[in-house]
Amino acid sequence: MSKHDILLLENQLCFPIYAASRVIIRHYQPYLDELNLTYPQYLVMMVLWEKSPLTVTEIGNRLFLNSNTLTPIIKKMIKKGFIEKTRDLDDERKVKITLTENGLALQDKAQQVPVSLLNNINIPNEDLLKMREIMWKFLTDMVRV
Amino acid sequence: MSKHDILLLENQLCFPIYAASRVIIRHYQPYLDELNLTYPQYLVMMVLWEKSPLTVTEIGNRLFLNSNTLTPIIKKMIKKGFIEKTRDLDDERKVKITLTENGLALQDKAQQVPVSLLNNINIPNEDLLKMREIMWKFLTDMVRV
DNA sequence: TATATTTTTATCGCATACGATAGAATCATA
DNA sequence: TATGATTCTATCGTATGCGATAAAAATATA
């Protein structure tokens, strides 16, 4: 790789990840619109469907986000009626985020989102699984440093 | 994959890409600070180092961004003295974005950015190249749809 | 046990992203 | 050659991300 090539867009490691992330999220949006969720809000729902309640920090640990980003997102989701906020009585610093009935009910409808998205992608399933595996490895390695 | 597993965070295709994108860009930031650039501004510089001048649309085609995102970024970069804006006399709709001398000079300093970043990553080079190849394929496939 | 430290959440300011749209310039074509 | 469609850039509003920081509560420790 010559000195010149180092700064070519095609040779960057991060750019295709950055661009792919945005492009895929655009593909999600029409399906998420039907659920009245944005993509980050959808991720918060996802971790709560796995376990509820969770504290803000616990949600952040799953999504690699901090309270400066999560607090406003959570506020909007409370307004929409999908989640509720209660103080932890054992530790008044913590806030417990709990699914409401509406939030829980949304899970059924949400099953269609990944299915619909996959129908839009013309990449062999094997390649997709390989991609996911590599990206998780990459992600966990980058977080560790 | 059971009905329940479809919505597990671990099984999502997009999430590790979305999270990795943000985590890597965080790693870039200290090096970009030295150049007085944000990550998207760095990408604009990169395509201009390849070819200058370019129109806003041409930059957007490289980066998968539209004028609603690029116009404010370009304004900030003009303010920093890295680029200039002139109307295309042959087509008054178009705006030509040109590197200034300072902007061109920045290229030398920028050579260190990808090098420094790679020094932070403990993943075999072969894996990184494989990852980049897969992400480009994924990206171009997703854009096509 | 008083106090320094850490944890947890929230706020603020700035910089993207992006859908919707506007307005000017150019193009296509009836 | 009018005029309807398209292209190009910019603006606006909303929703993230994130560094820096504040404030309250809990923990550690001198």
Image (tube, coloured by chain):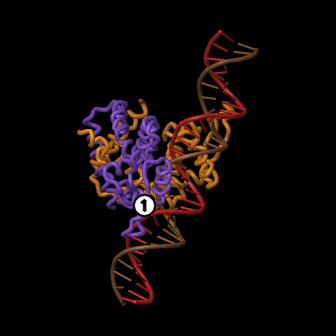
Chain colours: A purple, B orange, C red, D brown
Quadrant showing the C terminus of chain A: bottom left
Which residue is depicted at the point 49% across and 39% down? B64
Which residue is depicted at the point 45% across and 54% down? B111
Q: Where is residue A91 in the image (x, y as percent from the top left)?
A: 38, 70
Q: Which chain carries label 1?
A: A
Closer to the camera, A8 or A57?
A: A57
Q: Is residue D7 above or below residue A139?
A: above
Whether residue B22 sits left or right of residue B73 in the image: it is left
Is any part of residue B112 visible from this angle?
no
Closer to the camera, A85 or A10?
A: A85
Q: On the image, which quarter does residue A112 sit in? A: top left
Whether residue A15 sits left or right of residue B94 in the image: it is left
Q: Is residue B86 above or below residue C30?
A: below
Is any part of residue A84 visible from this angle?
yes
Tally of numbered tags: 1
Which residue is depicted at the point 45% across and 60% down? A67
Whether residue A77 sits left or right of residue B81 in the image: it is left
Q: Position of residue A108 (x, y in %)?
A: 34, 39
Farthest residue in the front direction? Answer: A101
Question: For mark 1, does the 10 Å Cα neighbourhood hold few (<14), some (14 to 19), or many (20 or more) residues?
Answer: few
Q: On the image, which quarter does residue B144 sit in? A: top left
Determine the secondary structure under disc 1: strand
Q: Position of residue A76 (x, y in %)?
A: 50, 50
Q: Is residue B50 above or below residue A118?
A: below
Closer to the camera, A30 or A106?
A: A106
**Residue type (three-letter) at the residue carrying disc 1:** Thr
Q: Position of residue B14 (x, y in %)?
A: 36, 43
Residue designated by label 1: A86
